[in-house]
Amino acid sequence: MLDTTPDHNLYIGLMSGTSIDSIDACLVKFTTNNFQLIGHYEHPITAQLKQKILQLCSSGNHEIELMGTLDRQLGLEFARASMQLLQQQNLTASDIAAIGSHGQTIRHRPELASEKNFTLQIGDPNTIAELTNIITVADFRRRDLAAGGQGAPLAPAFHQAAFQHEFKDRVIVNIGGMANITYLPKSGDTSGFDTGPGNVLMDSWIGQQRGEPYDKDGLWAASGQCLPELLIQLLKHPYFQQSNPKSTGRETFNAAWLDTQLSQSQRVKPYQPADVQATLTEFTAISIAQEVRALNTENNVEVYLCGGGAYNPQLVARLKQHLPCNTIASTAALGLAPEWVEAVAFAWLAKQTLHRLPGNLPTVTGAKKALPLGGVYLSGV
């Protein structure tokens, strides 16, 4: 073990997800059977930096050059987020056992043939370790993929550790850029997978049409009407017929794909933009709800939402409409606010790795075995 001192139990988790809206940094204290969120900080991602990241999410010219420079630049931003959090909490590097950094996903292709499939996150952990002088654990997903898994989703292992209940069946729904669910039965194996798009298409459409980063409170969607013919067309995507394990990303659900769906419509007049937004919100809600129903759980299974989508009242209302037999709340009811769940998860994954404990769930990712994830980048002496 790299860290065995029982009082050295403070970790930082860093998360920048598919939505690319900020770097979430969390300071977490772990005890034997529990955790406590001590502090958090939301580090901004500039519009210019977000555009560079989006550029790398699809094929283009000079990819290696852009990736190399952006890898370093994001490493600097992750380090700055960590140092700002330390300053906020009046702590020093010596107080922290390790940083767990998810990095920024720029390509996720688990569906390719074996030994050609890959997942790639950038945000140089060498830079983070050097600037913060804190052990940094990163590149979690590729180890699971090397063991035959999808490399995602990884949060279900943390959901199991943090939210499983001895007498109640629970489902954790993470609605970030993509959405994923974790089924936590009171007995039996945990399962989980990506259900499809979360906020990514909604954010992309409102950005394109109104220049806004997201649909605040779902008000624009609420002003429109769902378009049944477009919704049916979107739900025909072959991803929804794939069996588990499965995971997805911007490679599959993106603005170009949406434009293709709209252009293929036989409608004489163009759709009203607000109606498209309403339909995309319904698309996300139905693609989540149908997977929750397919779990064949008891009607009273508890559903808890996390990620940015938990703060979209229109999306939550549509989920409740499609899951009338389930109680639906946010993970705040379990003691952890929705926006910090994933960053805390990567702090937990760093702890697991340093203690040589598994960070993946083979029942979720499809890996051949449970194993510690990621590479460890030591701090300076």
Image (spheres, rainbow, N blue to C red):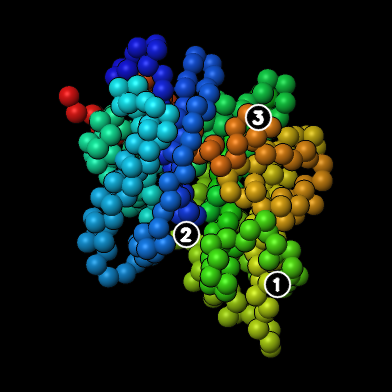
Residue pictured at 37% horizontal, 25% vertical: 91
Q: Residue furthest bottom?
A: 268
Q: Secondary structure at mark 3?
A: helix
Left or right of 211, for residue 84: left
Label 2 crowd bin: few (<14), some (14–19), many (20+), radius 10 Å: many
Crowd tier of the residue under label 3, counting other residues whose Cα lies within 10 Å: few below 14, some 14–19, many 20 or above: few
| Number of the label disc, if any, that sits on residue 334 | 3
Query: Is there a contact, CB below 8 Å, between mark 2 and mark 1?
Result: no
Q: Is residue 195 left or right of residue 16?
A: right
Where residue 96 sits in the image (x, y, percent)? 35, 24
* Quadrant into which the N terminus falls: top left
Q: Which residue is mark 1?
A: 275
Relative vertical location of residue 208 with respect to residue 53 in this rendering, above or below: below
Q: Which callout, 3 or 1, points at the residue further toward the start of the chain?
A: 1
Q: Considering the image in quadrants, where does the C terminus appear?
A: top left
| Label 1 Cα neighbours within 10 Å, binned few <14 / some 14-19 / many ≥20 | some
Query: Which residue position holds label 2?
Result: 250
Residue 365 showing in the rendered view? no
x and y percentages locating residue 190 in the rendered image: 59, 31
Horizontal and vertical percent position of residue 171: 66, 37
Disc 2 to disc 3, how far (Cα)? Answer: 30 Å
